[in-house]
Image (cartoon, helix red, strand yellow):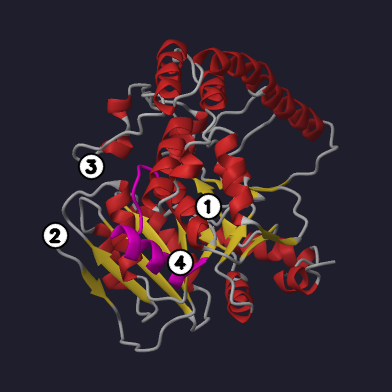
């Protein structure tokens, strides 16, 4: 395995923030992300691109078109797993704070203001609530009964600009008692689309020998960081720009649902050898099970078996069945097996499952339908900016929108605690 980093000029000083992209075979999107980020002239910024593509096209483009010492590019030719590529990228990042994004994503330049604020407050992490997303023109996401979807559009949902400080122990307990599901809805650290201090990553590496494990690197990182972070701010302000292209996990696994339910077919298992799946999680491939397996892997790696024992298998099973067709039989079978392993009553667990099925997925569906109806009726304002061809266009459009509405990150932190 070889890794060579190409820099146009050397810099010995440690950058304040490393924005990190682990990419593979998605050159047009990676090029757009690189261009948009390097438009920011801030000299405290570092952009790390770790490439595991089959071709050298991205490397060639960078050598031909980029002359900026802030870019660190590396390529490993041998095929890596998602997690392997993320680990290589994290190893190369030198910033005091680190933020991972996807190769079809972008950032708000104000993220540097957030990094300076985090440093002044000695924060371990800044988690960012998702209030917008960009659909690439080729995303293939279909319109629904409630919402018309257009490619090449930036969708901006209302955001409050509020800053809160989260209790990590409380948030982790809340997560496992909810079946380990939907970690993004909890006030947990986010290395993916959030800022994390290097000391937290070093603490994880010192304990586990890696920065990421499990199958979902962003989920694993969120829980592992929560185990070591003590001062975490959660900001309801768009510091990053999540994107969705036709080959992104968001599209393939969420909206289009092209993937098989066989665990053996999960792309996360490629190049992972004999991966040990968590014995408490149903052996089906779904967004929910990948999340929970990775969450448990993080908690165990960080010595928090006490939290694993609080995992609500009934809720996990209910939501998994509610969100995925044709999985009821294996999920229920594995739920009962998991209850037996945990030494919990299968009768009580079955009753909890029935209650969770009625109060969980059904209520969540009704809530989504209500929100979409309110959007159609104009009661929930969602701004859509169309005809944006790439992340450069998107970052410019976001900046114009924020200026036009008098929104600045500095106002969020000025008003914190009010």
Q: Residues within 10 Å of mark 2 (few under 14, many from 20)?
A: few
Q: CA distance from mark 4 to mark 2?
A: 27 Å
Q: Of the numbered discs in the image, which one, if any, rests on residue 272?
A: 3
Q: Of the numbered discs in the image, which one, if any, rests on residue 389?
A: 1
- Element type where label 4 sits in the image: helix
**Residues marked 2 and 1 touching at CB (< 8 Å):** no
Q: Residues within 10 Å of mark 3 (few under 14, many from 20)?
A: some
- Element type where label 3 sits in the image: loop
Rendering coords of residue 374 (x, y %): 81, 32
Q: CA distance from mark 4 to mark 3?
A: 25 Å
Q: CA distance from mark 3 to mark 1?
A: 35 Å
* Residue located beneath label 4 in the image: 200
Upstream in sequence: badge 4 or badge 1: 4
Number of dots carrying numbers? 4
- Element type where label 2 sits in the image: loop
Q: Look at 27% across and 53% down and name the residue there.
A: 84
């Amino acid at each position: 395995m070889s890794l060579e980093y190409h820099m146009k000029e050397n810099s010995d000083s440690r950058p304040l923030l490393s924005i990190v992209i682990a990419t593979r075979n998605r050159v047009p999107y990676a090029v757009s992300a690189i261009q948009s980020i390097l438009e920011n002239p801030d000299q405290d910024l570092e952009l790390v691109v770790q490439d595991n593509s089959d071709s050298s096209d991205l490397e060639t483009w960078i050598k031909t078109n980029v002359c900026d010492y802030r870019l660190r590019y590396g390529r490993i030719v041998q095929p890596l797993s998602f997690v392997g590529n993320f680990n290589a990228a994290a190893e190369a990042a030198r910033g005091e704070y680190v933020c991972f994004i996807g190769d079809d994503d972008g950032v708000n330049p104000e993220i540097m203001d957030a990094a300076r604020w985090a440093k002044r407050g000695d924060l371990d992490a800044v988690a960012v609530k998702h209030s917008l997303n960009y659909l690439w023109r080729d995303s293939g996401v279909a319109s629904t009964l409630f919402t018309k979807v257009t490619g090449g559009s930036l969708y901006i949902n209302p955001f409050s600009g509020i800053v809160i400080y989260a209790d990590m122990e409380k948030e982790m307990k809340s997560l496992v008692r909810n079946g380990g599901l939907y970690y993004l809805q909890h006030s947990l650290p986010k290395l993916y689309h959030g800022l994390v201090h290097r000391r937290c990553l070093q603490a994880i590496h010192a304990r586990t020998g890696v920065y990421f494990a499990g199958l979902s690197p962003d989920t694993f990182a969120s829980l592992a960081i929560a185990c070591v972070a003590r001062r975490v701010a959660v900001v309801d302000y768009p510091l990053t720009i999540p994107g969705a292209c036709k080959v992104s996990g968001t599209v393939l696994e969420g909206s289009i649902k092209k993937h098989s339910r066989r665990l053996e077919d999960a792309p996360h298992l490629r190049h992972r050898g004999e991966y040990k799946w968590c014995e408490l999680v149903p052996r089906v491939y779904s967004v929910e099970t990948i999340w929970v397996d990775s969450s448990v892997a993080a908690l165990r790696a960080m010595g928090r078996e006490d939290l694993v024992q609080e995992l609500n298998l009934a809720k996990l099973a209910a939501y998994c069945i509610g969100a995925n067709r044709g999985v009821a039989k294996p999920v229920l079978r594995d739920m009962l097996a998991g209850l037996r392993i945990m030494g919990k009553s299968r009768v009580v667990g079955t009753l909890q499952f029935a209650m969770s099925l009625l109060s969980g997925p059904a209520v969540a569906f009704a809530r989504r339908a209500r929100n979409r109806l309110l959007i159609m009726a104009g009661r929930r304002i969602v701004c859509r900016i169309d005809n944006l061809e790439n992340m450069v266009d998107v970052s410019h459009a976001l900046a114009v929108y924020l200026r036009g509405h008098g929104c600045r990150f500095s106002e969020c932190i000025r008003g914190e605690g009010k």
